[in-house]
Image (cartoon, rainbow, N blue to C red):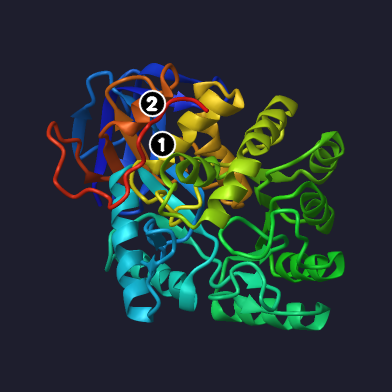
Amino acid sequence: MTKINYTNIAVYNHDRQAFIPNQHMVVDTQTGMIIETASGNATRQACDEVVDMHGRFAMPGMMNAHTHMTDMPTYWWQNGAEKRHPDSREMCTMFAIRNMQDALAHGVTYIRNVGAEFDIDIEIKKMQEKGWIKGPKVMTSGRAFCITGGHDSDCGYEVDGVDEVRKGVRQAMKNGVDNIKMMVTGGVLKDGETPEDIQFTFEEAQAAVMEAHHKNKTAAAHAQGNAGVKEAVAAGFDTIEHAFEIDDETIAMMKAHKTTIVPTMNAMYAIYKHGQGIVPDWAQDKVITNIQKHFRSITKAVAAGIPIAMGTDAGTPFNGFQNESAYELQLYVKKAGMTPAQAIDAATINCARAMHVQNEYGQLLPGNHADFIVTDKNPAKDITVLQADKDVYQNGAQVHAQQEVAVAHKSQNPVHISAAL
C-alpha cells in the first residue's frame, strides 16, 4: 500500500464550479481511491510520500460518453474512392489498443464506447482492467442495434420487430455489455438516409429500453432529427446522442424524462472544416444542411438547463482519440454558450451521472477513484488550457507526464482549431 499526499494544489469543486486553491488530496495507489481532500497541507493519514504540486490545477479526468474505439478517423479517403477503415477483427483490435493509449495520454480516463465491431470493446475492457493495456476505463455497448439495412448496419446487430429487439438486447447483455446503443434515426455517414429518417418504431425502441433497464443497464439512442429525438425521449433512453434538431416541446419532454444530451459537436465540425474532397459529397452535403441547426439546438438545450455530457463520436472522420475531447469542450463554450466551468462539468460529473457511476467518478472526493489531470493554468478561466499537454493520473498513479517538447507520435488526422462558422 502506498499513500501519497498531493499538497499545494487547486482542486476543482463541482458545486462551486471553481478550482479551490491551497488544498491537499491523499490517494491510496493500492485501492486507486481518494481517501482525503481538505484545505492546507496537513493530514492525519500516515503517508508514504508527499508531492508538492506547486499551486497547479487538478480536476477529474475527462470522461467521453461517445466513442468508437475500433474506428480510425481516416474512414474515407479521396471522396470515398479509397476506404481506410479496419474490416478485420485483428485490425479493429489494433486500432482499439492504440486509440485507448492516445485517449489516456490526453487526459481521458473513462470512456463509454457506443458501438464496436465484433464486440471488441468487451474484451478491451477486460484487458484494461487486468492492466494488460493502457487506456481509460471502459463502459461497453458491443455492437449497436440497427434495422436491417439501417444506420451502422455494416457492423451492428440488425433487428426488426419487438421480439427481435428483445432477443438481441438480452443476448448483448449476456455477452457482457454495460449499455445498449440503438440507432433510432438515420445519420450523416450512411448514404441513402437522412437524420430525419426514423428507423425504429416507438414500440421497438421502448422494448430495448425496458430490457436494458430491467437489468440495470443504461440505454443510448442515436437520434438526430426532431421527431426521432422525441420518440427516443418518450421511449425512455437515458441519453440522446447528437440531437441535431430540438424544439420547445422536446426540451419539455427531456426535462420530464430527465434525459441527457451527448452532443458530439466535433463530429460535424471536423467534417465541415476538413472533409471537402475527402469525405463523400453526400455526407458533406448532410453536414452542411444540419450543422447550424445542430449548434442552435445544443445552445437551446444548454440555456434550458438540459444536462449535457461530453462525447465526441471519436473515430469519425478527422475526429480521433487525442486532443479532440478537449477541443469538443471548446466548441461547447464557443458554439453552445457554456461557461468553461459548465464545459468541465460536461466532461466530468455530467458524464458520470449519465453513465450511472457518479458515486465513484466525476468528482475529486473521498471514496471516489483517483483519476485526475493536472494543468499549469486554470481551465475554468480558459477551457483551451485542456488542449495543452498535462499530467494524467489513473488510480492515483501518474500514467502520463507533461513534456516540454511534444513527442513525435501524432494522430493521422489532427483537428485544427479553425475560425468560427
Residue 395 appearing in the image: no
Q: Is residue 101 above or below residue 322?
A: below
- Corner quadrant of residue 70: bottom left
Mark 2–mark 1 CB contact (< 8 Å):
yes
Residue at image point 42% right, 18% down: 20
- The disc placed on residue 371 is none
| Residue nearest the observer in this picture, 64 or 348 | 64
Residue at image point 82% right, 51% down: 227
Q: Residues within 10 Å of mark 2 (few under 14, many from 20)?
A: some
Q: CA distance from mark 2 to mark 1?
A: 7 Å
Q: Residue 335, image x and y in percent?
A: 56, 27
- Amino acid type of the residue that numbered disc 1 sits on in the rendered structure: Ala
Q: Residue 126, image x and y in percent?
A: 40, 71
Point out the tag, 2 or 1, that comes first from the N-terminus: 1
Residue at image point 57% right, 56% down: 282
- Amino acid type of the residue that numbered disc 2 sits on in the rendered structure: Thr
Q: Residue 160, image x and y in percent?
A: 76, 80
Query: What residue sits right under mark 1 in the picture?
Result: 326
- The disc placed on residue 384 is 2
Q: Is residue 123 above or below residue 249?
A: below
The mark total stands at 2
Q: Is residue 262 above or below residue 192?
A: above
